[in-house]
Amino acid sequence: MEKIIRKREIPPMPEGIKIRMASRGALPGQEISDISQLGVQDIVKKVRTGKYLSVMMAPDEDNEEGFLMMESSSDLIFLQIWDAETETAWTCFNPELLDSDEKAPIEPSDGQSVFPLKCTMGDRELAAKCVEWYAHTCEPYPGMDWLKNTEE
């Protein structure tokens, strides 16, 4: 079932880093070794400036509990959070394209994934905030509207 979850008030950024894994893509050898506070700030800066077109983060090293995945081109960003416990996916979305079946022109880091155009955005600053929030909470950023998908 698909449902739009509207943005809400943004509480202060929690202390500490909750992720245990980060990478610049989906393939082996793309791991980011520094996931300290400074390391996360560097990841956020590289997302914001477009230096990182792909980011994966997870609360566990095997992505079994869930993950954040960001894949992008120069102008489009696909951002998804998966929670394995609840089998729920949150994705960014373009409200004007919700009825579209088009595929986004984004080259995936794994070489095979396909992203729906309706689940893209162009705001790199907002994507950076989502990445930073996830690193601290392992939850979707409350300052953005999300498209929530569940198996119900």
Image (cartoon, rainbow, N blue to C red):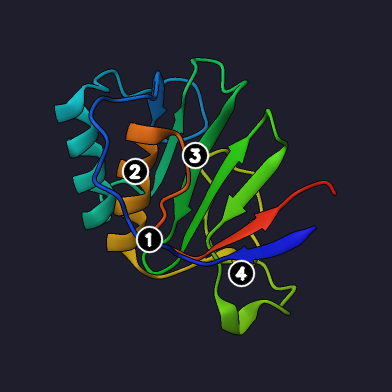
Estimate the x, y position of residue 118 in percent, counting from the top left. Answer: 62, 71
Query: Which residue is identified by label 2?
Result: 133
3D distance between C-alphas at marks 4 and 2: 24 Å
Question: Distance from label 4 to label 3 (Cα)?
Answer: 18 Å
Can you tell which of label 3 and label 2 is closer to the viewer?
A: 2
- Other residues around mark 1 within 10 Å, as few (<14) / some (14–19) / many (≥20): some
Label 3: which residue?
Answer: 68
Residue identified by numbered label 1: 143
Q: Nearer the viewer, mark 3 or mark 1?
A: 1
Does label 4 or label 2 sit earlier along the sequence? 4
Please name the residue shown 68% across and 43% down the image.
88
Q: Residues within 10 Å of mark 3 (few under 14, many from 20)?
A: many
User: Mark 2: which amino acid?
Assistant: Trp
Q: Earlier in the sequence, mark 4 or mark 1?
A: 4
Q: Is residue 2 left or right of residue 81?
A: right
* Percent position of residue 144, x then y: 43, 63
Q: Can residue 30 be seen in this snapshot?
A: no
Q: Residues within 10 Å of mark 2 (few under 14, many from 20)?
A: many
Instruction: Give the alpha-carbon distance from disc 1 to disc 2, as whole Å.
Output: 10 Å
Amino acid residing under circle 4: Leu
Vertical comparison of 111 with 123: above or below = above
